[in-house]
Image (cartoon, helix red, strand yellow):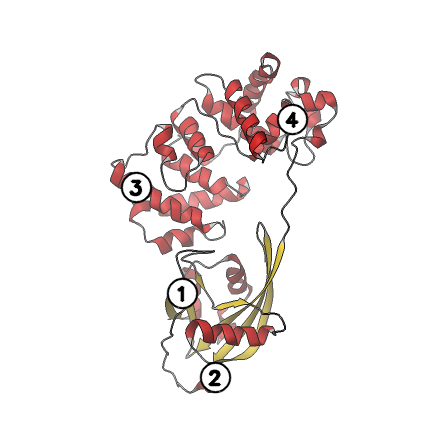
């Protein structure tokens, strides 16, 4: 491990001179570090900063987050995706208030026991916020170590993960875990990038095994990407008496506890128009008819890509006058009839939010 150790001082010097001015780095408050780490998963850093600042204005401390309604937390998270992370963040804040007296725990095991915190996040918070000698291995760290140390097995598979963790722990300089982990992550984001790594400007190029062997483009070794499943879905915006019907999804499952316009998958041989009328009947018992097609929204997720056929609906026959009928919910926990200008106050899945953002309120009236 002696040869591999050679690049660590160079990396720490680079970080000291080049680290970004990020808001959670100014005081390394455990709450701020924790929120930033949860937000940064699967999200570009330039987007994280704006979301982080807004989130901290709304929920400036653990107590404020714990006391907030879940809908408010989900709304503040809207646009970051992976809403289970927001729900776990909320649940963990409540746990900290009840089990730790409102003080974020500093021991690695106690951090790891909080809802929604895995090995990476526990290591990151323990080292960055509290200076514990713990490693935090994310995709950036995997890539940097795979190149610098020539790890020749897929880093996302068990053997590769184990090898990366062994090397990360062996290279960890005692009492400098904060700088070490942040340096590896920052270096992977800014210099040792997945594509087009800046090897010419790399301060550790002389100690990088992949550079020496001419195999930078072959490291890290990757697992075959998962196939992307296409999904065709129909959804309806039901307008009646100047109100729009929305429903809140069940707590479990995809997009749990988010609000939505009812809809679902288009069955084989079924038209999108027929699908949205059928889905509304099955989910609410409302008899509806299509007034017009609004848009086709496309949105990609990790393993599937949704094509969302969106329709403006009215109650069939308009037999209820201005009365707002009560649904019989089968796929949601609650519902509301809201004014178009109130939609902005509810957290929706990304595809539905794209639909709302595409039009101003006059479209619905």
Neighbourhood count class around disc 3 (C-alpha, 10 Å): few under 14, some 14–19, many 20 upward: some
Question: Which numbered disc, 3 or 2, marks the residue that appears first in the sequence?
Answer: 3
Task: Report which residue position mark 2 lands on.
Answer: 316
Q: With respect to residue 16, does 113 lie above or below? A: below
Task: Report which residue position mark 3 lands on.
Answer: 95
Q: Cα distance, mark 4 to mark 2? A: 63 Å
Neighbourhood count class around disc 2 (C-alpha, 10 Å): few under 14, some 14–19, many 20 upward: few
Residue sitting at x 54%, y 41%: 46
Tag of residue 147 = 4
Residue 38 on image: x %, y %: 45, 41
Question: Which numbered disc, 4 or 2, marks the residue that appears first in the sequence?
Answer: 4
Q: With respect to residue 61, does 251 lie above or below? A: below
Residue 329 on image: x %, y %: 39, 70
Residue 148 on image: x %, y %: 63, 23
Question: Which numbered disc, 1 or 4, marks the residue that appears first in the sequence?
Answer: 4
Task: Report which residue position mark 1 lands on.
Answer: 332
Q: Cα distance, mark 3 to mark 1? A: 27 Å
Residue sitting at x 32%, y 34%: 104
Residue 273 on image: x %, y %: 58, 76
């Amino acid at each position: 491990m002696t040869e591999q150790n050679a690049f660590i001082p160079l990396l720490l010097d680079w970080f000291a001179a080049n680290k970004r001015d990020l808001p959670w780095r100014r005081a390394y408050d455990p709450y701020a570090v924790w929120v930033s780490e949860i937000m940064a998963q699967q999200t570009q850093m330039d987007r994280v900063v704006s979301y982080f600042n807004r989130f901290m204005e709304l929920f400036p401390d653990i107590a404020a987050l714990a006391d907030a309604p879940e809908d408010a937390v989900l709304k503040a998270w809207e646009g970051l995706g992976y809403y289970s992370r927001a729900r776990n963040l909320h649940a963990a804040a409540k746990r900290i208030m009840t089990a730790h007296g409102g003080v974020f725990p500093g021991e690695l095991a106690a951090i790891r026991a909080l809802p929604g915190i895995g090995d990476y996040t526990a290591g990151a918070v323990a080292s960055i916020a509290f200076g514990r000698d713990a490693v935090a291995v994310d995709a950036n760290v995997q890539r940097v170590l795979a190149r610098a140390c020539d790890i020749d097995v897929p880093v996302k598979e068990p053997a590769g993960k184990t090898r990366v963790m062994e090397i990360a722990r062996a290279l960890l300089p005692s009492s400098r875990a904060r700088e070490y982990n942040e340096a590896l992550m920052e270096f992977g984001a800014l210099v040792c990038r997945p594509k087009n790594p800046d090897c010419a400007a790399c301060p550790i190029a002389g100690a990088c095994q992949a550079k020496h062997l001419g195999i930078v483009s072959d490291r890290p070794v990757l697992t075959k990407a998962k196939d992307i499943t296409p999904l065709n879905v129909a959804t309806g915006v039901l307008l009646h008496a100047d109100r729009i019907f929305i429903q809140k999804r069940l707590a479990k499952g995809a997009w749990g506890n988010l609000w939505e316009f009812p809809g679902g998958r288009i069955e084989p041989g079924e038209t999108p128009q027929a699908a949205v009328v059928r889905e509304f009947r099955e989910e609410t018992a409302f008899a509806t008819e299509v007034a017009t097609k609004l848009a086709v929204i496309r949105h990609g997720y990790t393993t599937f890509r949704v094509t969302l056929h969106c329709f403006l609906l009215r109650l069939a026959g308009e037999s209820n006058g201005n009365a707002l009928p009560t649904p019989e919910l089968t796929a949601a926990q609650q519902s509301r009839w809201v004014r178009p200008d109130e939609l902005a106050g509810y957290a929706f899945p990304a595809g539905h939010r794209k639909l709302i953002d595409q039009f101003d309120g006059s479209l619905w009236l």
